[in-house]
Amino acid sequence: MRHVAHDEERDDSVKAARGPQPEHLAHSDAREVADRLEAIQRTLRQRLAAAAQRYPVALTGPQVLALERLVESMRATGTGLSLSELSGQMGLAHSTVSGIVTRLERRGLVRRMPQPDDRRFVSIELTQPVMDWLSNELPAARMQPREAAMRSATRRERAVVLEGLAALERLLEGDARERDADDAAAAPARADRDAASG
């Protein structure tokens, strides 16, 4: 990964200039932002995984993946997943995922719930203790590495991090708004073109 201190094109006068940067610099900077964000996410996942190892129930990689998919489903829809849905999302065979679910069920982490309208179909759902853990302990476990980093940072470093993140958010939102406006402006012309060709 490159680091910020690079060639003369990056002197303070260029950084201070407002307006679009040359395309090659924008692409290079965007790649660096992506690389650094991925590295931060990887570090946070590793810290969370290390914290999870301290819990009394050790889990295998596929078991963690199954739980992650169920968590995503619960957050998005408020319900669990069928075995075939979970298999599809995990990219594993139905029989393999069935074994994973059985082991998680034995540990009290998931339960198979028959669908009220058709008892032949079951939904795999997280148990209440897991839901409680997700609501209470997981957010604190996720926040802990960030808090530790901010505690070890100087006041100036904290300000730089916060200012940089705020600027990135603002720039991304502005770009999205511009694209939405461009799409809205182009829509009537597309509709006219489609009507003329149809």
Image (cartoon, rainbow, N blue to C red):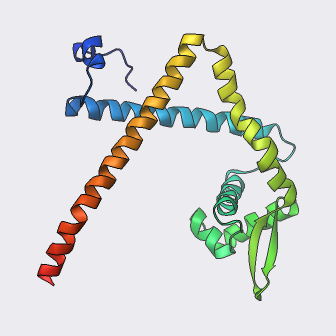
Residue 29, x across and y down, in percent: 33, 30
Task: Tell me if I can see residue 93 in this picture.
Answer: no
Give left or right: position of 91 versus 135.
Answer: left
Q: Nearer the viewer, residue 18 or 102?
A: 18
Task: Locate the N terminus by quadrant.
Answer: top left
Judge whether 1 appears above or below 141 on screen: above
**Which residue is at a point 23% across and 29% down the rendered structure image?**
21
**Which residue is at a point 35% across and 35% down the rendered structure image?**
31
**Which residue is at a point 68% across and 74% down the rendered structure image?**
82
Residue extending furthest toward the left = 196
Residue 4, x across and y down, in percent: 37, 19
**Which residue is at a point 72% across and 51% down the rendered structure image?**
60
Q: Nearer the viewer, residue 99 or 159?
A: 159
Judge whether 166 appears above or below 118 on screen: above
Task: Tell me if I can see residue 130 in this picture.
Answer: yes
Task: Locate the C terminus by quadrant.
Answer: bottom left
Residue 167, x across and y down, in percent: 43, 30
Q: Nearer the viewer, residue 77 or 36?
A: 77
In the picture, residue 182 is in which quadrant?
bottom left
Residue 149, x across and y down, in percent: 64, 21
Q: Nearer the viewer, residue 173 or 30?
A: 173
Tally of numbered tags: 0
In the picture, residue 131 is in which quadrant?
bottom right
Give left or right: position of 101 versus 21.
Answer: right
